[in-house]
């Protein structure tokens, strides 16, 4: 019984090390997916209103209508970029399929975003 414990322990450690290497290789590098949020975006609140312009800079600064908003990043993943504004509300950029959407917690509404750079 005592001889089996070191063998079992060694196999467990080897399995864990191999598993972590495989998982690490499957995850995309951060630098590969953050660029999809960077750019100038537009959304419309109502059909006949002017579009609202949002810009996300490469430094993750957030600008509304070319005015910088003081925000901090809460989450950055391939599916979501979440900012927290100075009042504690979330500003969420999220991919739903191929469509990037914008959710402002203060308004409680989600809007589809279109690239304003095209």
Image (cartoon, grey):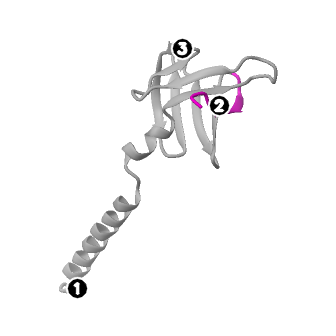
Residue that carries the numbered disc 3 in the rendered image:
66
Coordinates of residue 93 in the picture (x, y in percent): 58, 34
Mark 3 or 2, nearer chain start:
3
Q: Quadrant of residue 9?
A: bottom left
Q: Give neighbour class at mark 1: few <14, some 14-19, many 20+ (Cα, 10 Å).
A: few
**Residue 95: mark:** none
- Residues shaded magenta: 107-118
Coordinates of residue 1 in the picture (x, y in percent): 23, 87
Q: What's the residue at 59%, 15% (across, down)?
A: 65
Q: Secondary structure at mark 2?
A: strand
Q: Please, which residue is most extreme toward the top here?
A: 67
Select label 1 or label 2 by which is in front. 2
Residue that carries the numbered disc 2 in the rendered image:
103
Q: Quadrant of residue 25?
A: bottom left
Q: Please, which residue is most extreme toward the front here?
A: 118
In this image, 4 relative to 42: left or right? left
Question: Quick check: marks 1 and 2 in contact, CB under 8 Å?
Answer: no
Mark 1 or 3, nearer chain start:
1
Mark 1 or 2, nearer chain start:
1
Q: Quadrant of residue 16?
A: bottom left
Residue that carries the numbered disc 1 in the rendered image:
4
Q: How far is disc 3 from disc 2 in space, using C-alphas?
A: 19 Å
As displayed, is residue 3 above or below residue 38?
below
Q: What's the residue at 81%, 20% (across, down)?
A: 48
Whether 27 is among the magenta residues is: no
Q: Secondary structure at mark 1?
A: helix
Q: Nearer the viewer, residue 38 or 90?
A: 38
Q: Give neighbour class at mark 3: few <14, some 14-19, many 20+ (Cα, 10 Å).
A: few
As displayed, is residue 49 above or below residue 23?
above
């Amino acid at each position: 019984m005592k001889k089996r414990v070191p063998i079992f322990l060694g196999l467990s450690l080897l399995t864990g090390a191999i598993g972590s290497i495989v998982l690490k290789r499957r995850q995309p590098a951060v630098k590969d997916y953050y660029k999809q949020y960077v750019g100038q975006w537009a959304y419309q609140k109502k059909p006949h209103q002017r579009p609202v312009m949002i810009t996300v800079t490469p430094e993750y600064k957030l600008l509304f209508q070319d005015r910088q908003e003081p925000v901090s990043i809460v989450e950055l993943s391939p599916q979501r970029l979440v900012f927290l504004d100075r009042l504690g509300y979330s500003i969420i950029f999220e991919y739903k399929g191929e469509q990037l959407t914008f959710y402002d917690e203060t308004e409680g509404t989600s809007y589809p975003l279109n690239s304003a750079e095209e």
